[in-house]
Amino acid sequence: MPRTITSSLCILLFALTTPAVTAADNTGVVSPDPAGIDLASVHAAVADLDTGEVLYRKHERHVVPIASVTKLMTAMVVLDSGEPLGESLTAVKREHSAPNNAYTRIRMGSRLPRSDLLRLALMSSENHAAYLLARHHPGGMTAFVEAMNAKAQELGMTDTRFVGPSGLDSGNRSTAADLLVMLRAAEGYDTIREYTQTRRFRANFHNPRYSLYYGNTNVLVYRDHWDVELSKTGYLNEAGRCLVMVTEIDGRRIGMVLLDSFGKRSPMGDAGRIRNWLRTGNGGAIARAAREYEQRRVAKLSETQTAEATVQ
């Protein structure tokens, strides 16, 4: 069950509607100047989760595809449902073709406990595991997606919409601001924190019996000099490279949302820049190619929004 998070979410929602400034919080810690950092992610938001102070924001209100970051909401809906985590679920084929590559190593007809499917969806971003969690939800896929959107509304994520549980569909859209709220909510679930921290996992299937090995998609989880409390990666062509993460930096619990980052390792590089910025006030530079990528993506998003507005 989730920890009590209502008051913290209210503080964070308020902070997201006010400008980010350089100031001392109620612990006396001075937040660095946002001008001292540049990120390779097109959309971003960074917050001190203990105080609710938003430390940095960048295109944080742009509504964009979020890829597998979706699975944090999927996990909350699964856990909120109260369905037994020890129940074995049967792997079945998709009812409809996925809009993007949905390759899986899971054999159809085999069985795995709900808890293991949830762990695979979170730590290794196994798309079919997320699909199976939704298919076996009371009321099926339709009820599951409805529950995802209801949870988003409950949390105050007003610019968020889900159409599926895995993130393969670019119709799953949100903002960096909304995802910061979702990240804070997901942190309230002990199971989500544990599963997203898992480095490696052996899944033992039945009917037939076989085992598959999985690794965490966030390389920072493997690095001892990072204290990652919760994280989720994501990637689609439409969404770019994404990373949301909660990590402790010098005693502060920091939430990061990094969307549409330039390059495969750029989200991790941005996380390092944020940590350096918080410690020294200087986050370092990004490559010229990353700046040009951002300009192209923002321009394309603006064109898309203009076209959609014209149609309406």
Image: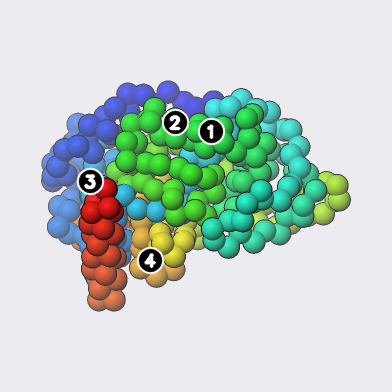
First along the sequence among labels 3 and 1 = 3
Badge 2 amino acid: Lys
- Residue ID for mark 1: 77
Do tag 2 and tag 4 residues touch (Cβ < 8 Å)?
Answer: no
Q: Nearer the viewer, mark 2 or mark 4?
A: 2
Please tell me whether mark 4 sits on a helix, a strand or a loop.
Answer: helix
Query: Is 92 placed left or right of 74 in the picture?
Result: right
Badge 3 amino acid: Leu
Please tell me whether mark 3 sits on a helix, a strand or a loop.
Answer: strand
Instruction: Please name whichever residue, 269 or 9, is drawn nearer the observer in this view of the structure.
Output: 9
Do tag 3 and tag 1 residues touch (Cβ < 8 Å)?
Answer: no
- Residue ID for mark 4: 266
From mark 2 to mark 4, how far is it between C-alphas?
30 Å
In what quadrant of the picture does the N terminus appear?
top right
Label of residue 151 in the image: 2
Badge 4 amino acid: Ser
From mark 2 to mark 1, how far is it between C-alphas?
8 Å
First along the sequence among labels 3 and 2 = 3
* Colouring scheme applied when the structure was drawn: rainbow
Please tell me whether mark 2 sits on a helix, a strand or a loop.
Answer: helix
- Residue ID for mark 3: 55
Q: Residues within 10 Å of mark 1 (few under 14, many from 20)?
A: many
First along the sequence among labels 4 and 1 = 1
First along the sequence among labels 2 and 1 = 1
Do tag 2 and tag 1 residues touch (Cβ < 8 Å)?
Answer: yes
* Residue 109 horizontal/vertical position (percent): 80, 48
**In this orientation, does residue 228 appear?**
no
- Say which residue appears at 24% left-offset and 42% top-offset: 54
First along the sequence among labels 2 and 4 = 2
Q: Is residue 170 above or below residue 118?
A: below
Q: Nearer the viewer, mark 4 or mark 1?
A: 1
From mark 3 to mark 2, how far is it between C-alphas?
26 Å
